[in-house]
Image (cartoon, rainbow, N blue to C red):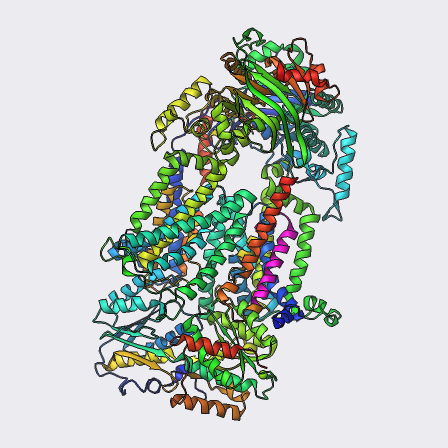
Amino acid sequence: MSAKGGIPLEDSILRLENITKVYSNGVVANKDISVDFRKGEIHSIVGENGAGKSTLMKILFGIEQPSAGKLYLRGEERQFHNSLEAIDAGIGMVHQHFMLIPTFTVAESIVLGMEPRKSMLFLNKKAAVAKTRTIAEQYNFDVDVTKKISELSVGAKQKVEILKTLYRNAEIIILDEPTSVLTPQETEILFDELDKFKKLGHTILFISHKLGEVKQISDRITIMRNGESRGTFNNAEITMEELTARIIGRDLISSYDEKKHDWPEMTPVLKVEKLCLIQKGQKRLENISFTVKRGEIFGIAGVQGNGQDELIRAIAGLTGHVGGTITLDGTDISKLSIKKRRETGIAYVPEDRMSDGTAGEASLGDNIISTYFDRPSLNGPFFMRGRRINTEARRLIKEYSIKAESPSQKIQSLSGGNIQKVVVAREHNTNPKCMLAEQPTHGIDIGSAEFIHLRLIEMRNAGAGLLLVSADLDEVMGLSDRLIVMYDGKIAAYFSDIKGLTRNELGYYMLGVKQQTPEEIGGALHD
Amino acid sequence: TTAPATEEPPAEATAAAEQTEATEAPAAEKIYKVAVLVPFIGDQSYFDSVNAGRLAVEDYPNVETTLIEMGEDKSKWESYYLDACEGGYDLIVGGNNDAEEYFYAAAKQYPDQKFFNFDYVNHVELPNVFAVTYNTPELGYVAGTAASLITQSSMPKANAEKIVGIVVGMDFPAMNDFVSGFCQICYENGVQVLIGYPESFTDSAKAKEIALNMYAQGADVVWQVAGGAGLGVFEAAAEADKYAFGVDSDQTIALSGQPNLAATIVTSFYKDCGASVKYAVDMLIAGTYPTGAKTLGIKEGAVGLIQNQQYIDMVPQEIRDQIDAQVAKVAAGEVTVISALADDAAWQDIKAKATAPLN
Amino acid sequence: MTKRKLSLTGDTAFETIKTIIAVFIALAITFCVLALTCENPVASFVTMLTGPMTKLRYFGNVLESMVPLVFSGLACSLLFRTGLFNLGIEGIYYIGGVICSYIACQVFGNSFTHPLVAILVPALIGGLLMLIPGYLKAKYNANELVTSLMLNSIYLGVGLWFIKTYLRATDYSSTASPLFTETAVLPYIIPGTRVTIGIILAVAAALLIYVLLFKTRLGYQIRMTGLNPNFARYSGMNAMSLFLLVHFISGFLGGVGTSVELLSIYSRFSWVTLPGLGFNGALMAMMGKNNPIGVLVVAFGISYLQIGAEIMSRSTTVPVEVISIVTATLVLLISAQYFLRGWREKKLLKEGMLHV
Amino acid sequence: MSEFLSVIFSEEFLSTVIRVLVPLLFASMSAYIASLAGIPNIAVEGIMLMSALFAVLGSYWTQSSWLGLLISIGAGLVMALILILCTIKMGTNPILVGIALNTFSASFTVFLLYLFTQNKGTSASLASIVLPIVNVPIIEKIPVLRAIFSGQYTITYVCILSMILLAVLVYQTPLGMRMKAAGLDERAAKTAGIDVNKVRIIAVLISGLLAALGGAYMTTGYLSIFTKNMIAGRGWIGIAAQAMGGTNMLGVAITTFVFSLFQAVTNVFSLYDLPSELINIIPYVGVLLGIIIFSVSTYRNSKKG
Ligand SMILES: Nc1ncnc2c1ncn2[C@@H]1O[C@H](COP(=O)(O)OP(=O)(O)OP(=O)(O)O)[C@@H](O)[C@H]1O
Ligand SMILES: Nc1ncnc2c1ncn2[C@@H]1O[C@H](COP(=O)(O)OP(=O)(O)OP(=O)(O)O)[C@@H](O)[C@H]1O
Ligand SMILES: [Mg+2]
Ligand SMILES: [Mg+2]
């Protein structure tokens, strides 16, 4: 079954032999990995958070150097000391986190590092614009190359990242979780492109936690676990279940439905009425009204950038200038400070765990108490009680199976999935009446994602109201009891029951193709 | 009659202070250890002059000197004085404005050693201390005399306007003591004075800009009293092709590397701290170390103007004679010179009068 | 995931080894410089290292010169903790000194209340003045480096003018205040030195700030705000008021520092330029990694070295300026992050490979 | 007052502004280019001081003002090299290195001065040579223009040229774009295949070169003598101007110009009987008010949208 061995060297364009990577802090991220990539294939790499996928790709791209092992490119042994050498050798990489500079234009971002010149010395700005435009057209990417990066949507930024590799003539394109921020439609387009590249002879290395996508697009799949390779498989020869089992070492719960549970009295807990928001002279939110009840998960679907983030931040109190009212459990919280809102019973899992959800330089312990550090049980009359805080942190680490050595470890040394678990643990631990969860499993491996989902369901079952924002349709459809779709700062649709709702139907509302009547939408508030 | 300040015989410089002869003491075996404490040398001003005095006595066979630079951090000075006292020196030369309190405290604590304050402001009477100060206003007066004569003269770079300038490092009484006498005589002579304070003793560029402004407004001679920054005035003079006065010592010597700048200096008005240091050491060796405080002025030759060849070549005989006459008048005590340090009201008054534009 | 703490190369052990080796190298360089500039390098070197221990007065010098460094170091470290590069302590030291002197020259109270007022008032005003760049930054995002540098020069000008116009000593030839009233001066605690209760205040301040930062809710909030203001705001902390509070405390420390320095070491105010203690404080803060105890240790170390070098230069022909070469080398080596890193990584790699 | 106005509106005043502006412009551009590439250069003051001294020593040793200038630039580059090596190779905080270099330079210049002149205050006794004053034939005759473009010290023209080259470098060359990228986001630059360290080394060396020219200007024409601590805070003004302008070169230049204008006015004011301490803070107050107005209006605009 394993595709390993057997393949003659000539067939493989890129071959790794016994690659081991030990980071300078002693972490062994890759252990004795041997794998080869063939010309014209889409090769997926899957594995849990921290399995070492990104590290392996960084080694291929010259950002990290292997501690041991060899790398053969087109049969020839190579060593990349920096990205420039990798780029020159025809390797391109789209990173897990965008590597774009907000103040640069699209054209500048794309040509950076390989700028067209005039008379040897000078930047040829016109040629830069022309060249990038040509490439974008050639591959059917619809982006305005004269726009600034900061003005682009997430999907457009993703496109720019891919254009960057194409501009560099990459024969091997590495995509580290490119789809985690895209809508289904955008993902479809991307996959079409990838298929096209494949046919043109490009090799694509694809990393994703969404196994459905992996199955859909891959020729071959390499599984990683604990820094080791657990074998490479032909896509056709491995089932979804097998794949899952090999990644997390057990089976996944197929559906959360059985866990559904009706809270005895579905009283409203969060009521948002006629919410409006104007930012930088633009209407960001217009007349948003809905009610979240105890014991339900209220979903908000939508393409990123259609006001979901602003809405959640307005409810949490992070954005000012709100017209309309927000009522939590009978109290009008729309004029209250963030702290007061939290005290009234709001908890919030933010979209960006690194910039809002944690202080990377601070310890895990400090991070896990930030929203209730003044709780009497953690404090004496004057001082904070270090030992109790430690105990509390250890308890949460255990309960949420966070992979960490001790509460005094810096949080940024945890893998992304574990950081997300810390955030969820902390917010859960405040026992909120209403939890705002924004992209709670973004970029997280399936095992951890399931764990977080179960926690959210548990909260719901204990009587909390949950407001779930997600760009991942599987997630939002799998978890929500009721659902609205947001488009252009307005509610485009409301579904009181999501049974029978199709992804495509939802997609039409998300893209603004369809729109419900005000009466239908009114149900969000009054149901 | 070339007579740079440091070469003047000390006996003449301090004629008023007791009669002196014997420089070679009979007790030949004794080696006299002298410590000289200044914040730093190279100020182009009296610390350098004190050091010159030290170097002069260094040549004596029975004198050993140590120069101690204390740095500009005043909080450290006390320990430098105490260290010097504990270092077994026979004579400790120090004092002047900011260090005075440490100087006198140390003198009190170590009564067996002799102390010499080379430029006092508030003398404290102690049996082992001798202190001198210099009549700065008189020096300013002489400089003002020369300046007002030159601006009205037909010297090649002099103009019709009766305007002169003075660039002063900072606006505080000890510095203004140079200005008060200067203003006094200029006002008497109907000459307007431009005063500029760069508020720095190191920013020569700023001093240059101020001096350039003065020259642009019609001044034809500017006196610099601004330490290192003052060198900018000579740069301005060279650029504007005008005259400048030096201060503290013969600055044509200091500017030996830059003849075009040295050429702008008509004369320098000196304060001979070095000579007084030498005098104190001589007295120590002679076994007649004085106590008390003395003010040294024109009469004692401790302040005055440099009459070198350049001066003689540049300044016509009749002007030099007029200056000499005025100097003699001051030496004879016929003029009461206003001191900014001693009489603030009078200084403010003369400053207002002398700086008022002429009509 | 094989993740192990590796003992010899662990963070604390490595930092210690690194610092010791850096100090040794810096001293070796110093020795070379001495060998080039003076006749008896060995003796001079020994004097430099042991000088401060040879006399109580010298050791007193070490303590007294570390006091202002501790205060400005603490003040700067708090500012740096907010992630800002604000050099305003320099100006606070000046204007605070002017205010302290004004009070110290008045006649009132006794030898307890007078210094108390003379320290607290400049401290309060220092705190308030520090709010200017703090507020401009927090509210309007005005660059704190620009505002603090400009304010430093402005405080100098205004302070000089104030002294000249309202507080000038008539018996003194340069711009300076009259002698401080006797009751205002801080008492000496070690006879034969100028070590006053200032040193106790400095150590107390460091401990207090340490406790504040690491043991209290306020300190927790300050640390989180400093590390990630977005996170602090998201968590419900009032980032703006914390930010202003930190600036206030920092200015307050600056005011206390300058007052303690003046009332301990000086008998009148005669600074006509910025004292430079603010910049040195920035150095202390950075070398002490913005940790109060670190600042204390660094301030002692640098003062010791400085005094040792001064004693050496007094008794030898070495020019005082050579000290600066020594200090610069030491500062650069100790604060080098990558210094010995290669060695450490090789070791880590070896140990890590064992687990593969 | 009318007298004051007549001074302000004179051609002479314009050339005063230019004279004051040149070293400050070098300082701020030095700070600008380094910070653009992501290495704050706090050592501008120290580099200027060192170069000012070496310009004098160099021209004295070689008896050629041009060789002196070269030596001075060399000294500046060495200082810059220390900054960049400590930062890149040793991972020292660049600001710490900057402060250390400034302290070092303040003492070391005095030490060198003493070594070569036996004087700790000035280089006046050295026969150093200045660069010539350049008169430009036709411009010499045109009012106003001649105040700016003729009869200036050699390095003033070097300054004009440097500013043009710098603007071209930053805005018209790949290197400039890479510097900006390295400064704005090191990781993004690295993954785009840019050798960030190389770009930074170049930027800091250019920064050293500009600071060195600023220092050399002080002693090769504007003045001909080195005096201890003669840079007197000009480097810091440059750093403040950089901080105000950020990545916008024009903003940095305008701030510097405004400061110089105020400085020149101050020099004129200092001949009037006003409290000189207060007069001397005018340029600082000017820049402070400038940044307050600028920040408040930016804030208002961003609120309005
Ligand atoms: N620069 C680094 N220094 C030290 N350790 C690192 C570094 N980068 C990654 N690691 C560690 O190496 C391990 C593997 O990380 P890697 O990023 O390769 O995982 P991954 O498979 O990409 O995970 P994810 O699915 O979350 O993206 C993790 O334990 C991580 O903490
Ligand atoms: N110097 C470091 N020391 C320790 N851990 C580090 C270091 N640098 C990065 N890491 C950690 O290694 C992990 C791998 O980095 P990477 O950029 O691939 O993110 P990730 O963990 O894979 O994120 P995600 O969960 O979003 O996929 C991150 O969690 C990061 O915090
Ligand atoms: Mg990853
Ligand atoms: Mg005249």
Q: Nearer the viewer, residue C309 or D147?
A: D147
Which of C185/A340 is in front? A340
Please check the rendered image and state whether residue D265 is part of the magenta-colored stretch, yes or no: yes
Q: Choose top left, top right, bottom left or bottom right for residue B82.
A: bottom left
Residue drawn at x 77%, y 28% as measured from the top left: A139
The residue at the point 33 percent across, 61 percent down is C105
Number of numbered discs overlaid on the protein picture: 0
The secondary structure that most of the magenta stretch takes on is: helix
Image location of residue A224, percent across then percent down: 56, 19
Whether residue B193 appears in this view of the structure is: yes
In the displayed structure image, the side of residue D6 where residue B202 appears, left or right: left
Q: In this view, does B71 lie to the left or right of A53?
A: left
Q: What is the quadrant of residue B16 in the picture?
A: bottom left
Q: Is C152 drawn above or below residue A149 in the view shown?
A: below
Horizontally, residue C81 falls left or right of residue B78, namely right
- Is D131 left or right of D99, judged from the image as shown? right
C169 over B22 or under it: above or below: above
State the image coordinates of residue B202 (x, y, percent, origin top left): 48, 67
**Does residue A321 lie above or below A119 as drawn?**
above
Q: Where is residue B237 in the image (x, y as percent from the top left)?
A: 57, 76
Is C330 magenta? The answer is no
Residue C6 percent across, percent down from the top left: 41, 30
Q: What stretch is highlighted in magenta?
A: D241-267
Q: In which quarter of the image is ligand 3?
A: top right
Against C31, residue C221 (above or below) is above
Relative to the observer, which residue lies in front, A208 or A101? A101
Looking at the image, can residue D123 be seen? no
